[in-house]
Amino acid sequence: MVSRDFGREKRLLTPRHFKAVFDSPSGKAPGKNVLLLARANDLDHPRLGLVIGKKSVKLAVERNRLKRVIRDSFRLNQESLGGLDIVVVARKGLGDLDNAELHEQFGKLWKRLARQRQQAAPPGVSDSSHA
């Protein structure tokens, strides 16, 4: 069983990590008021980075709520995401969705990224093979 925590190793921490995803994303999942960009990493777990600017979401309390809900959703869905670096870019209006709507939308977006990742994997290579 994969641990469902959200420790430091599950986060994109440096500007270099973010830049790598922005410069050459291998997967994209646009949603309502949000864009997810993904890029394969060489790790056995996904990492998450959040870009929720003041321009898109005015109030700090709303930005923090979004971060909490997105991290929670990521934590619950990370097994299916494997070795991806994912950046979530918030757009205007994301803060207007309630927590249930956010969870539902992000659930679909994680599934879409996981599907794109599986389609990109060369045939014969499975995720479950651990040496």
Image (cartoon, helix red, strand yellow):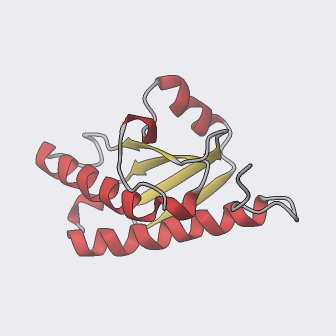
Q: Residue at x 51, y 54 (%)?
A: 36
Is any part of residue 92 visible from this angle? no
As drawn, the residue found furthest toward the front would be 131
Is any part of residue 43 visible from this angle? yes
Query: Taking 31 as reference, is 20 above or below it?
Result: above
Residue 55 in the image: state x and y as whole percent.
28, 42
Q: Residue at x 55, y 48 (%)?
A: 45
Closer-to-camera residue (76/103): 76
Displayed quadrant of residue 103: bottom left
Q: Left or right? Give the position of 27 relative to 73.
A: right
Q: Residue at x 30, y 48 (%)?
A: 56
Residue 16 in the image: state x and y as whole percent.
54, 24
Query: Taking 96 as reference, is 20 above or below it?
Result: above
As drawn, the residue found furthest toward the right would be 123
Q: Left or right? Give the position of 11 relative to 53.
A: right
Residue 76 in the image: state x and y as whole percent.
38, 64
Residue 19 in the image: state x and y as whole percent.
56, 30
Displayed quadrant of residue 43: top right
